[in-house]
Image (cartoon, rainbow, N blue to C red):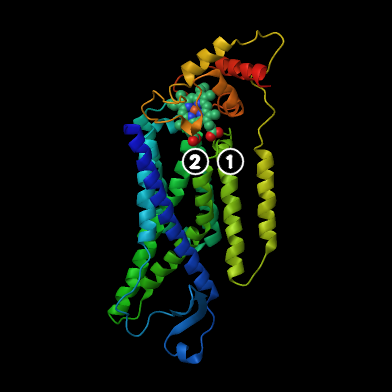
Amino acid sequence: MHAYLAEWLSLIIRWFHVIAGVAWIGASFYFIWLDNHLREPPQWKKDKGIKGDLWAIHGGGIYEVAKYQLAPEKMPGELHWFKWEAYSTFISGMALLFAVYYVGNPGYLIDTSKAALSAGGAIAIGLGTLAVVMLVYEALIRSPLARHGLAFGAVLYGLLVLVAWGLFEVFAGRGAYIHVGAVVGTIMVANVFLGIMPAQRALVDAIEKGQEPGARVAQLAARAKLRSVHNNYMTLPVIFIMISNHYPMLYSHAHGWAILAAIGFITAFARHFFNLRHHGVTRPSILIISALLTLALIWAVAPAPRTGGEVRADSPAVTDAAATTIVRNHCVACHAASPEHPAFQAAPAGIALDDLAGLLQHGANVRQAAVDTHYMPLGNMTGMTEQERAQLGQWLNQNAP
Ligand code: HEC
């Protein structure tokens, strides 16, 4: 019952997180689009301080949007801020991190062949990484580096690759992936909370007091602009990382961190195409290069021809009884129609291995998860040996060649 309710909790938080993220990124895309499509307004609007306008049709009506150079003469009674989209995405994301990983199953984070972490140790590394990387980013954006956009971009990318590599050294692949995603998401929400919102508040304050916004407001605004450029380039990568967390072919790869680095580059570069296009510059070469790089990545991470678990003339055949023992010792606590493991209500990933028929049915997946890679058993909690993996592979070859 407990596992059943925990599944519902995680499902509901995930659902909320996706909706909040759609609202955040949707609003962000919309405002970038708006900014990039503003055209020079007629003189009478310029006289009112409007620097650009545009017309749009949606939902059966025509909209007229105007952006002021600074602010209207009189501040409107109701001014809409867009911050809860970001905050609720972050809060629900953290809740999900706790529900699925920290409280739900820290085993997703642990891979004893990389580091023999305790659950507490893994959680401390996870949360510590989020905090430290966010602080480093905050220090950088307040440093002179912030005056050199391209160099900053390169440093930020290098920092994130370093984080991906470091996490991959200590965490199981899936745990490393979700934490890289969480790091990027945390930087993005900190950009809103610590930079963009304060800059907007300073501007509104100055205007309400009837002052010309001074140098300080201008400086805050310039930095907020840089932060939103960073967020813009991180939107496509962060979404990719969140969903790639469901693809063991990526996170179980021996160089999973390098795959993340490549994907981060490709997706941010693809974003650049859209940014240029909004400014009327269409450069298809960017999309073509992104597509070619993606093909190169697909080629580079393709599984190597199998080496483990070959049927060798000199090795004795693996009996059904031996295969059953291996699976019973290492898999069935979780992968059963009704698992004994308290964290699971039903067979994880729908893979029940109660009997040899189940093992045969899922043979290809089992080989990938437990023979070709060490993704299973989760965190190698049961201490499955290389020999047992090879035997399992051999039994599969004998029975499902
Ligand atoms: C501690 C519990 C646990 C043990 C033990 C365990 N698994 Fe899993 N297994 C899981 C969970 C949880 C998932 C779903 C993970 C995911 O979605 O990435 C999973 C997923 C899988 C998948 C699907 C992976 C995919 O491609 O999505 C396979 C295949 C698998 N396990 C095989 C095995 C085999 C074979 C063993 C024994 C050698 C084993 N597992 C032991 C919990 C376990």
Task: Give the left or right position of residue 240, taking residue 216 as reference.
Answer: right
- Residue 210 tag number: none
Q: Residue at x 50, y 68 (%)?
A: 32
Between 377 and 401, the residue placed more toward the observer is 401
Kindly indicate the quadrant of the structure image that contains residue 69: bottom left
Q: Amino acid at mark 1?
A: Ala
**Relative height, residue 214 to residue 339 (above, below):** below
Q: Position of residue 304 (x, y in %)?
A: 68, 30
Q: Amino acid at mark 2?
A: Tyr
**Relative height, residue 361 to residue 51 (above, below):** above
Q: CA distance from mark 2 to mark 1?
A: 11 Å
- Which quadrant does the N terminus fall into? top left
Report the label total.
2
- Which comes sooner in the sequence, label 2 or label 1? 2
- Which quadrant does the C terminus fall into? top right
Q: Position of residue 110 (x, y in %)?
A: 44, 30
Between 77 and 328, the residue placed more toward the observer is 328
Task: Give the left or right position of residue 121, taking residue 303 as reference.
Answer: left
Query: How dense is the environment of label 1, judged by Cα within 10 Å: few (below 14), some, or many (20 and up)?
Result: some
Residue under numbered circle 2:
177
Residue under numbered circle 1:
258
Between 32 and 115, the residue placed more toward the observer is 32
Element at label 2: helix
Task: Give the left or right position of residue 281, taking residue 88 as reference.
Answer: right
Q: Position of residue 192 (x, y in %)?
A: 39, 60
Kindly indicate the quadrant of the structure image that contains residue 127: top left
Foreground mark, 2 or 1? 2
Element at label 1: helix
